[in-house]
Image (spheres, rainbow, N blue to C red):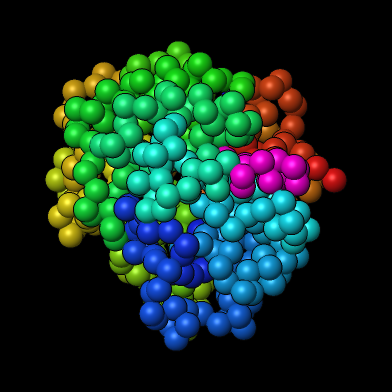
Amino acid sequence: MIQNLRGFVVSWNLTRCCNLMCRHCYMDASPFPGRASSEELSTESCLSILDQIQEVAPEALLILSGGEALLRPDFRLIAERASSLGFWVVLGTNGIAVDEGLAARLRETGIRGAGLSLDSAVPERHDAFRGLSGAWGNTMKAIASVKKAGLPFLIHTTVHKGNAGEIPEVAEKAYSLGAQALQLFFLVPSGRGRFVTNITVEEHDGLSKALGQLRLRYSGKMLINAKCAPHLRRIFQEENPHDPDVRGFSGTGGCPAGTQYFAITPEGDVTPCPYLPLYGGNLRREPLSSIWNHSALFQEIRDRKSLTGTCGICEWKHACGGCRARAFGATEDHLAADPICSYRPGSSPKAPSASGGPEAYGQECSVSLAWTPGALARTKRIPAFVRGMVIKKLENMARDRGLAEVSETLMDEARERMTGHIPKSPP
């Protein structure tokens, strides 16, 4: 059965203000950014942008983050409005500001769950990476608070040279705390992350294979997912060719940047990926629909034929595509080869056809299984360039379960899984 079926995701960095000084921060956020009050979007602008997001992606998973999003005085107003518009709203936070009272209020606003940062199983190492003594303890308190409020939570861990060897311990800690998923973010050299020592190509390959076993160890207990590592689909498919869940780990079509996912900066710039400092436009000057549908950057990102180097000739490029932000960080060319990938094009007998398939974005797909009228109507709200892929995956999901039709209930479950198994908050 396919796990973690991806839907349409929007990440919104609401502010550059933060109460930590994390070594890897791609936003270069800090307690005193200077420009926050003058350049960041106003409350009125944020509420207007929510309407624009609804026009482009009416059922989006909306991740509200920062900096530290909770430091915006109008955070609750923005979150409540987003929830009222039907978005699946989750919070990305370091947890410093989260206590029992705030956790309860977050649930009242319609927040569906939270992603909390934990970068080491050792408190002192986590504190050093996050730039604040006591950060570990604050995270533990935040976890206890969201659990008491009935909010599901994920653990977010940035993988780098300093903690790559303790990922199994981090996974066990996340599981013992009751996390529904461990999201591993492979370091991208963006913002302050440019000055953090990354793992080598050989270490990346070794860790990738170990993650396959780790994922199986926690199967049915806690999802272990990875971001900024589209190569994992290839590695897992080669290592576990008979595992029906392989595709769900790394996502169908590789990196979703610009195809199933986009990000908005505190100043209103729109990018295919928050780690990629290139923008399709600014929401102060043009509507989101125009940026999303017509900007040269987004069109270029979606065309895997535009890739260069080994990524350009790789038979996995439609199923992987490499990390465009990591390529840019290493070469200042977002279409260049991903430097952390060791694969030699043409060397795998399990490689897919280079012609594409459902990953060839923009192609429609007719249904081949029965659909309830309500479910079929909802497909019209899925962005056209991923609609065919989503239809195919929903039908495969139904067949795997022995179902005769695709229902709205199945679509809701698939939508939950795109968050990394964050379910609806209990009533």
Between 299 and 329, the residue placed more toward the observer is: 329
Quadrant housing residue 163: top left
Q: Is residue 396 visible?
A: no
Residue at image coords 70%, 58% = 102
| Quadrant of the rendered image containing residue 294 | bottom left
Is 1 placed above or below 125 here?
above
Q: Residue furthest front?
A: 133
Where's residue 199, x and y in %?
Answer: 23, 36
Residue 342, image x, y percentages: 19, 31
Measuring 34% from the left and 64% from the top, which residue is drawn there?
Answer: 28
- Any magenta on residue 178? no
Residue 424 left/right relative to 384: right
Query: Can you say which quadrant of the picture contains the C terminus?
Result: top right
Q: Is residue 93 above or below residue 400?
A: below
Name the magenta segment's main secondary structure. helix
The span shown in magenta is 141-154
